[in-house]
Amino acid sequence: MKDYKLTFAILTVAIVWGTTFLSIRVAVQTIPAWFVAGIRQSLAALIMLVILLYRKELQWIGWKNLKYQIVFSSLMLIIANGMTTVAEETVTSSLASLISACSPILVFLGSVAVGIQKFSIRAVIGILMSFGGVLFIFWDGIKDLANPDYAMGIIFLLVAIAGWASGTIFTKKLNIQSGNITLNLLYQFAFAGIVQIIFAFLFSEDYNFENWSFRSISAMLYLAVFGSVAAFFAYHYALTKISPVQVSILAYINTIISIFLSWLILGESISVKFILAAVLIILGVFTINYNPAMFKKQ
């Protein structure tokens, strides 16, 4: 019998995570980026708290585990998610999603550096393909880097993917996500939310709440409820039914969905060179992470 729950979970992860870059871009149109990130994480923490109270699973995780969760939260949520949100104030969502798609390359290189993954000829080919894709991105747009806001947006994105890669490697190396994942997430979301809200009041030039549009607020709520919580539970349900390498294929679908929706809904310009860049980067990352188990039935 077909597992409809699994199908729904996979579609949820692919579509919801494919819309997060679009949603961030809409949210930051009238809401300062750090407020978007901070409120998103805080609401996600509140939802996790309600779930844990309902399950009667709320408990103290211990100082050692708390230290790990704070490091992970700092890398994955405050730096990676936060910097991506800030970057999308000046960079299109399609470009943000495509540059973020390069993060597995840094994960691979970092994993090789710390000895948890081996280098290979296939990986070299994949890296060269992805690098070729990056060159296509800036082929005609190198002059745009003369714009300080645009240049800072690109720098923020690079910092974001470095944070994401570091957090991923940190998790692999120490296996800190074992145990009650929901409980760990509560501490991660709560810590990130508090820090990012503080950043919002410190670094936002204009945070007049009256200027926040209904459209931007709706996008921010969508990010909290669906982007941070619903997709997470769907992702972990999928992991119970199929292998991690099979689930990893969704990362490639997310990028395609994100670029398509950015063009369709926001009217962002997608050139032939941009499409070629997307193809090269996605194929390059796929080549690096290829595993025959991706296509085997469980």
Image (cartoon, rainbow, N blue to C red):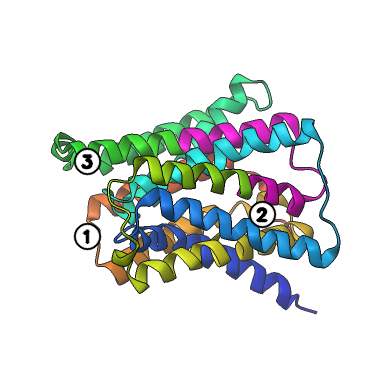
Residue 105 belongs to the span the image colors magenta? no
Give whichever of 86, 162 is nearer the camera: 86
- Magenta segment main secondary structure: helix
Query: Of the numbered discs in the image, which one, if any, rests on residue 269?
Result: 1
The numbered dot on residue 246 is 2
Label 1 is placed on what type of residue? Answer: Ser
Residue for point 78% across, 59% down: 240
> Between marks 1 and 2, how big is the CA–CA gap?
32 Å
1 vs 2, front mark: 1
Identify the secondary structure beneath mark 2.
helix
252 to 164, vertically: above or below: below
Considering only order in the chain, which callout, 3 or 2, is on the residue closer to the N terminus? Answer: 3
Residue 179 lies in the magenta stretch? yes
Q: Which residues are magenta?
A: 161-189
Query: Which class describes the residues within 10 Å of circle 1: few (<14), some (14-19), or many (20+)?
Result: few
Q: Judge by depth and name the residue closer to the eye, 8 or 36.
A: 36
For the residue pair 151 and 295, the one nearer the viewer reads as 151
Q: Residue at x 42, y 59 (%)?
A: 256
Q: CA distance from mark 2 to mark 3?
A: 38 Å
If you read the primary sequence from the N terminus, does the residue marked by circle 1 or circle 2 appear first?
2
Q: Residue at position x 69%, y 46% from top? A: 187
| Residue type (three-letter) at the residue carrying disc 3 | Asp
Q: Residues within 10 Å of mark 3 (few under 14, many from 20)?
A: some
Tag 3 residue: 149
Residue mark closest to the camera, 1 vs 3: 3
Residue 293 visible = no
| Residue 130 place in picture, x, y as percent | 40, 38
Q: Is residue 9 left or right of residue 131?
A: right
Nearer-N-terminus badge (1/3): 3
C-alpha span from label 1 to label 3: 19 Å
